[in-house]
Image (cartoon, rainbow, N blue to C red):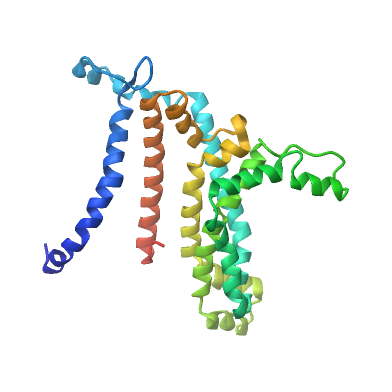
Amino acid sequence: MTRKTRRALPFLLPTWLALGLFFLVPLLLMLGISFAQRGIYGGLQPIQHLGNYLRSGAFLANYARSFDGIFLKIAWRSLWMAVATTGLCIVVSFPIAYYLALLAPRRWKGLLLGLVVIPFWTSFLIRTYAWMFILRTEGLLNLVLVGSGFLRHPVELLYTQTAVMIGLVYGELPFMILPLYASLEKLDRSLLEAGSDLGANTFQTFKRVTFPLTLPGLAAGIVLVFIPSLGQFVVSDLLGGARSMLFGNLIQNQFAVARNQPFGAALAFELTAAVLLLLLGYAALARRRGEDLL
């Protein structure tokens, strides 16, 4: 241990203690519970013969059950909806971030950024309930569409996968806009001018200069959007109902409804492990490129 490391240790110790207490300890408890069995009336069933329990492989029963077809179907739905949410957020966010960083008048930037951040001032649950009033059959959207003559009859949007996708994109959009804006704001304008002077049109300049230099912000936005979307359960519960159950809803139901804590813990640990692997992969990619993580 170097002298510099010893000097930094007293300052790092509180951080490591907080991480251990609030992250590592709960994670280990969840892992331990995932190897247990559900009691008859919920809770945990006491293990009579630990040696036989381990040798028989019964401690892996909850993980084996998670590979049943119905649970894999829910996991696949969660995965593709998280990917679709991330893709839609990129498509919507890039023009917004580009305008804010490179085209918007300086006097309007503060106001426009404030509009992006304003949703954080309100509870996410309240905002999701607001979308219920907008998307229901007698809601604002159908009222406008029918009143303007675009539709003859109201359409059912609430309690569909479309409603869930709208809610996910709406909720995660700021987390894509802000990292992209940060990357574009740091962009050296002289590089864009140099590309123009060398005969490149707007598309070629964007493809060869702007987009490659915004990849760190894009990667950070993908991580910030994809991971919460993968474990989301509030949006799918309120806007999708029982027909659009995601992996987060499955975990929540095991703890709150089925009272099967071991199986819920196994599912939660699998999701946590997947998220950690994604974060490690992103950290390795950023380290290879010599960039900050966020």
Q: Nearer the viewer, residue 36 or 234?
A: 234
Q: Nearer the viewer, residue 101 or 110?
A: 110
The residue lying at 49 percent from left, 31 percent from top is 250
Q: Position of residue 211 (x, y in %)?
A: 55, 67
Above/below status of 79 relative to 116: above
The residue lying at 52 percent from left, 39 percent from top is 233
The image quarter containing residue 110 is bottom right
| Residue 136 appearing in the image | yes
Q: Position of residue 46 (x, y in %)?
A: 26, 18
The residue lying at 47 percent from left, 41 percent from top is 231
| Residue 150 appearing in the image | no
Q: Position of residue 47 (x, y in %)?
A: 24, 18
Q: Nearer the viewer, residue 127 or 251?
A: 127
Q: Position of residue 270 (x, y in %)?
A: 39, 36
Above/below status of 195 relative to 254: below
Q: How many discs appear?
A: 0
The image quarter containing residue 269 is top left
Q: Is residue 216 left or right of residue 149?
A: left
Above/below status of 138 relative to 286: above
